[in-house]
Image: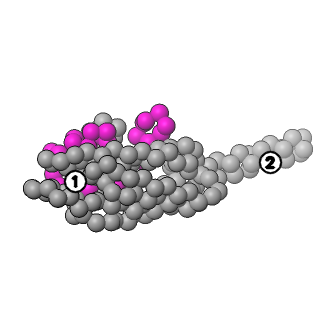
Amino acid sequence: MPTFLSASLRSVFVLTGCLITSLCQAESIALSVTIPTLDVDPYHRPYVAVWLETPERKGVKVINVWYEQDEWLKDLRQWWRKIGRSDAAAYEGVTGATRKPGTYTYEWTVADDIPAGNYVLCFEASREAGGRDFLRQAITLGGQQQQRYQLEGDYEFGAIAITIQP
């Protein structure tokens, strides 16, 4: 009987260790997002949303939203359909004002409730009397190596750099 108990306890510790390893991420995602200077008149600052979703396109976590008026959040169409319209609490703590042209950095520490696995990091920008950009980058959380990605927007985004630190 003691042997059975010891084997059971070992299994519990191994399973607990696996669960803790897959959930407790010490990872951070550093983002550098460029809003380009556009020669247009009138110029309106873009609304921007950054979020994490599954490969099946299910919204997981809002990382950042820049906006001025709630009324126009729906113009961030992809983000609005995935997370925005159904869960205002998901983005209330990560919002900020729209930004003028320039490069902005942001660091996000991956939450404990996001399990290791494959995800897609999404970036969307929309500007009144302007264009729209929607960019996606497949990433892996819970990996052991640093990941770096470079994206380039078509109009509303310039360069976007992503660095994931395990």
User: Could you tell me if residue 127 is visible in this image?
Assistant: yes
Q: Which mark is residue 93?
A: none
Residue under numbered circle 2? 10
Residue 68 is a magenta residue: yes
Find residue 77 and report its image quarter.
top left
Seen in the picture, residue 83 relative to 32 is either above or below; the reply is above
**The residue stretch that appears in magenta:** 53-80
Q: Quadrant of residue 5?
A: top right
Q: Which residue lies furthest to the front in this view?
A: 39
> The residue tagged with tag 2: helix, strand or loop?
helix
Q: Where is residue 129 in the image (x, y as percent from the top left)?
A: 13, 47
* Apparent side of residue 146 relative to residue 154 in the rendered image (left or right): right
Q: Indicate the amino acid at tag 2.
A: Arg
Q: Residue at x 30, y 46 (%)?
A: 133
- Residue 148 lies, in percent from the top left, at 52, 58
For the residues marked 2 and 1, what is the alpha-carbon distance in whole angstroms? 54 Å
Look at 50% across and 45% down and name the residue there. 138
Mark 1 = which residue?
Answer: 46
Residue 126 located within the stretch drawn in magenta? no
Relative to 42, 130 lies left or right: right
Position of residue 12 measured from the top left corner of the image (x, y, whole percent): 74, 46
Q: Are marks 2 and 1 in contact (CB under 8 Å)?
A: no
- Which sits earlier in the primary sequence, circle 2 or circle 1? 2
Residue 88 is at least partly visible in this image:
no
For the residue pair 31 and 40, the one nearer the viewer reads as 40
* Residue at x 42% of width, y 36% of height: 58
Tell me the quarter of the image containing the C terminus: bottom right
